Image (spheres, rainbow, N blue to C red):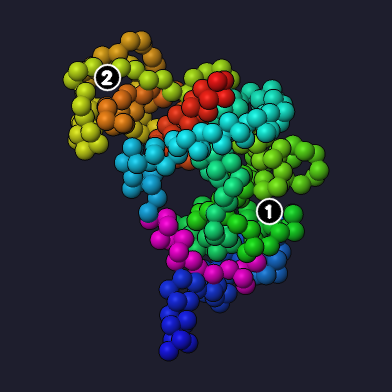
């Protein structure tokens, strides 16, 4: 009976890679042709890969999709995360001084992202990137993740890592700032100069890499990411379902929406200021309907995580850390 249960548990959670599958054979050929990896290196990595149903389940329950804004906000805007953000900044003040000067990115946003991603390096996930990325790489429309799998192999080869033993998120994100392998390889910074980009053990590398990612994706120094504006009577008292039901010529709460304040005002919004290229966010928060306007730096944050909720949470956590830091 125990043997049957064990077999059932394994079958529900892990499926070892079948190297005789046609799609895997094609991947091996493609990876060898498009990278510096040899066929034997690719096969060696793949031999240890398993499909993870646990990662598939986690993916289908992501709070960016499932949670209301208030529940999502409560996940990140906690007293402990704010206080730990202040502590993290003060413990690594010299690094942040240098990074802010070298990359032109606010220390509060860097710390906030690290706080949201790994609770300031205290939680790197309970998965491994080999299985999680392998799982996604052989699903339909998986070219992106096949490229990430190659990047993981290249990263592992370069630094002599065993990708089965590295901790990651359910999607295979790595290190202090939770970079997918391509971002690790392209945006990672060896800030401590030891010849090894180590986002797990080097705070210098981890902090600088987050800053570099934001800079390279268009972060503008001294520019605001988000501002809040008063909600006029027409849109006061709206809760989540009411906001979803609003029908405009543009989509609310979508970072891809880029409009002018004139367009918003034509739909009945009435707030101070005229702005171009804004992404409007209307949310139900702490018992009130609130209006936020996202600018270019807001959209830069969404390149880190393709979610307006995430970017708004990062902004609000950064602001709270900043207030507490200055007290």
Seen at 36% across and 24% down, the residue is 292
| Magenta stretch in the rendered image | 45-60
Can you give x and y, in whole percent of width and height, for residue 279 in the image?
38, 26
Which residue does the numbered mark 1 point to in the structure image? 155
Q: Secondary structure at mark 2?
A: loop
Q: Is residue 291 left or right of residue 130?
A: left
The circle on residue 176 is: none
Can you give x and y, in whole percent of width and height, for residue 229 in the image?
34, 17
Seen at 62% across and 35% down, the residue is 88
Q: Is residue 57 visible?
A: yes
What is the CA distance from the residue labelled 2 to the residue labelled 1?
Answer: 48 Å
Q: Is residue 279 left or right of residue 251?
A: right
Residue 54 magenta-highlighted: yes
- Sequence-wise, the earlier of marks 2 and 1 is 1
Can you give x and y, in whole percent of width and height, for residue 160 in the image?
75, 59
What is the magenta segment's predominant secondary structure?
Answer: helix
Residue 223 or residue 288, whichever sits in front = 288
Q: In the rendered view, tell whether residue 261 sits above or below residue 239.
A: above
Residue 314 or residue 269, whichever sits in front = 314
Seen at 43% across and 82% down, the residue is 5
Q: Quadrant of the N terminus?
A: bottom left
Seen at 50% across and 73% down, the residue is 15
Q: In the rendered view, tell whether residue 218 sits above or below residue 149.
A: above
Which residue does the numbered mark 2 point to in the structure image? 231
Q: How busy is the neighbourhood of tag 1: few (under 14 within 10 Å), some, or many (20 plus)? A: some
Q: Is residue 99 visible?
A: no
Residue mark closest to the camera, 2 vs 1 = 2
């Amino acid at each position: 009976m125990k043997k049957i249960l064990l077999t059932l548990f394994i079958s529900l959670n892990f499926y070892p890679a079948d190297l005789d599958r046609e799609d895997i054979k094609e991947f091996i050929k493609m990876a060898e042709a498009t990278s510096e990896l040899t066929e034997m290196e690719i096969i060696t990595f793949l031999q240890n890969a398993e499909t993870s149903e646990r990662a598939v389940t986690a993916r289908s329950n992501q709070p960016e999709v499932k949670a209301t804004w208030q529940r999502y906000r409560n996940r990140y805007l906690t007293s402990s995360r704010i206080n730990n953000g202040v502590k993290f900044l003060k413990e690594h003040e010299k690094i942040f001084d240098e990074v802010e000067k070298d990359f032109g990115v606010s220390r509060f946003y860097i710390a906030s992202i690290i706080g949201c991603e790994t609770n300031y390096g205290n939680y790197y996930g309970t998965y491994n990137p080999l299985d999680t990325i392998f799982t996604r790489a052989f699903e339909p429309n998986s070219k992106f993740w096949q490229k990430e799998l190659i990047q993981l192999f290249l990263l592992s080869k370069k630094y002599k890592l065993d990708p089965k033993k590295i901790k990651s998120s359910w999607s295979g994100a790595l290190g202090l700032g939770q970079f997918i392998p391509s971002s690790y390889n392209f945006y990672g910074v060896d800030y401590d100069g030891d010849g090894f980009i180590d986002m797990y053990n080097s705070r210098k590398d981890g902090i600088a890499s987050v800053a570099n990612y934001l800079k390279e994706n268009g972060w503008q120094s001294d520019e605001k990411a988000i501002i809040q504006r008063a909600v006029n009577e027409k849109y006061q008292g709206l809760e989540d379902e009411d906001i979803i039901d609003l029908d405009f010529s543009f989509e609310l709460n979508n970072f891809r929406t880029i409009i002018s304040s004139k367009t918003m005002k034509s739909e009945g919004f009435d707030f101070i200021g005229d702005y171009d290229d804004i992404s409007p966010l209307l949310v139900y928060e702490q018992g009130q309907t609130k209006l936020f306007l996202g600018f270019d730096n807001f959209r830069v944050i969404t390149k880190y995580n393709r979610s307006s909720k995430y970017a708004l949470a990062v902004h609000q956590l950064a602001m709270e850390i900043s207030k507490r830091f200055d007290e």
